[in-house]
Amino acid sequence: METKFTYTNLVKPSYDSPVTDLIIELEKLRTKRMGGTTDFYVFHQIKTIFHTLESIGSARIEGNNTTISDYLETKLNSDNPSKIQANIEETREGIKEIRNIEGAINFIELAIIDSKIDKSFISELHKIVVSKLDHVTGEGDKNPGTYRHSNVEIGKSNHKPVDWTMVDEYMEELIAFINRDDLPKYDLLKIAIVHHRFLWIHPFRNGNGRTARLITYAMLVKYGFNINSVRILNPTAIFCSNRGNYYSNLANADNHTDEGLLSWCEYVLTGLKTEIEKVDKLADYAFLRKEILIPAIDYAYEKELIKEIEVKILKSVIEKQNIVANDIKGLFHNKWNSEISRQIKILTEKNMLEPIGEKARKYRIRIFNKYLLNAIIHYLGKNDFLPERNDVVVIDTSKANKG
């Protein structure tokens, strides 16, 4: 049996360390009031897109080759259950794996505020991550939510995870560290250290990477970086953007020296700062409208996914963030009011507009539909909001119904 390596002390950067500078800057972002001019509902739709992209990115680190286009097709066909089922059964564990990660993100957002990140919480995350996946040849686990009872190896890595007989003890130590009552100034260091330490232990037979990245997200929300549920969109994009950098930085910390751990913390906090600053740009509606929404409408029209009158209506909605029928009357010269209502109904049925409230006569834009979603993602990619930009070019707009 191997000698137990104990590590429960926080590594502490010097005053002039770049890690200290990052902590100070991120603390300003944590306490900054998330105002912004983007309508909450529009921002929430963007957040949903980012969580989908995060789920795809996290799965791809583990070798999942599902493209953004392939996965979104299954989501956009949600009004056709038979087609979705055919897609899932016909293909891929890859689709189910990504769905599981999305489900785990939803679980975190619903449960984390009132829950401790303890053994049962981590177990539940792992169960969701590996649910219904093949444990022999795929990304599943024979014993979901249960620590491994045998030794494992990590492909293409020099790290040898701890002996299985010590997993329980190491995980008890880690969970105590997570829930220890340290000063808030150490929260960010703890987030980075826990991510590395969890992967160093490798407590499950499979699904450790996906679970570690979800624990990172849970800790970020728990520590207040998800202000009013609107700020954090794609925090673990810091790991998804370059798989090689992710693995090499993890490896540098494997000896648990202060130097290696501080280098790892700098890598994590630099990425986190970049991602939060990106998100705050999307809260500026002038930026979102000019750089993402309006170009996306033009793009969809260029691809013949929407009609000219629909372009005009949607741009009017984007300009005001919400409209009533009278706001677009000028687009319908010498037309009866019934024609305005008919066009609004068409856009509503296509999920491009949505009434605000029951029986409401005010409408706002919906972007999660087969006419606009690919275009939105295209321009998020062009503005460096996506962790894997090369995947954007394979988005297939031809599959949308042009009718």
Image (cartoon, rainbow, N blue to C red):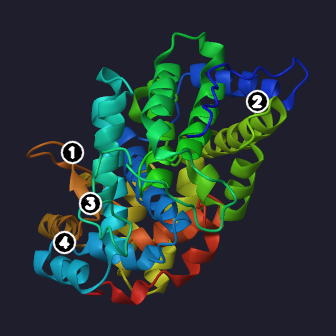
For the residues carrying marks 4 and 2, which lies nearer the camera in this image?
Answer: 2
**Badge 3 element:** strand
4 or 3: tag closer to the N-terminus: 4
The amino acid type found where label 2 is placed reads Leu
Q: Is residue 67 above or below residue 367?
A: below
Report, in whole angstroms, how far the alpha carbon at label 4 lies from the one at label 1: 16 Å
Q: Nearer the viewer, residue 61 or 81?
A: 61
Disc number lying in front (1 or 2): 2
The label shown at residue 356 is 1
Label at residue 22: 2
| Point 34% across, 54% down: residue | 129
Q: Amino acid at mark 3?
A: Leu
| Spatial separation of the CA atoms under disc 4 and disc 3 | 9 Å
Q: Residues within 10 Å of mark 3 (few under 14, many from 20)?
A: many
Residue holding disc 4? 346
Mark 2 and mark 4 in contact (Cβ < 8 Å)?
no
Q: Residue under circle 3?
A: 353
Whether residue 282 appears in this view of the structure is no
Q: Are marks 4 and 1 in contact (CB under 8 Å)?
A: no
172 versus 88 height, above or below: above
Frontmost of labels 3 and 2 is 2
Q: Quadrant of the C terminus?
A: bottom left
| Marks 4 and 3 close (CB-CB < 8 Å) | no
Q: Earlier in the sequence, mark 3 or mark 2?
A: 2
